[in-house]
Amino acid sequence: MTIQNFQKQIEAIYYTRDAARGVPMTFTWFVEEVGELAKEIRKEPQNIERLREEFADVFAWLATLASLLDIDLQDAAQIYADGCPKCNATPCSC
């Protein structure tokens, strides 16, 4: 699945509900999901399946926010296509 296809899938599943909630509250949910990911990262031993689920949740909420703000994540990712967007090096040499 491409980033663009993922974003469209998340729109199909959640856009109506998230649009009704609005950007500020959707952003709050996104931050909460980032917090859940942080908790899983800190756990020892790490549960790879739980990490995978939390990464997916964070990515889904990011996609929802992007859609609500009319940002194509596939297009946004192109900023890094040539390496660091500031110095264009890979790895970054800034």
Image (cartoon, grey):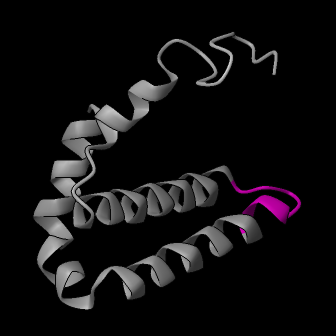
Q: Where is residue 7 drawn, in percent x and y?
A: 24, 49
Vertical comparison of 45 with 86: above or below: below
Give 85 or 1, whichever is nearer the viewer. Answer: 85
Residue 12 placement: quadrant: bottom left
Decide whether the magenta segment is chiefly helix, strand or loop: loop
Vertical comparison of 54 with 8: above or below: below
Residue that lies at the very extreme toward the front in this rendered image: 86
Q: Residue at x 19, y 39 (%)?
A: 5
Vertical comparison of 29 with 94: above or below: below
User: Is residue 62 toward the left or the right of residue 93 in the image?
Assistant: left
Give 17 or 41, whichever is nearer the viewer. Answer: 17
Magenta-drawn stretch contains 65: no
Q: Where is residue 80 drawn, in percent x and y?
A: 51, 24
Q: Residue at x 17, y 61 (%)?
A: 11
Q: Which residues are magenta?
A: 40-47
Q: Residue at x 27, y 51 (%)?
A: 71
Q: Where is residue 57 drawn, in percent x and y?
A: 46, 63
Vertical comparison of 33 with 70: above or below: below
Residue that lies at the very extreme toward the right in this rendered image: 44
User: Is residue 92 toward the left or the right of residue 82 in the image?
Assistant: right
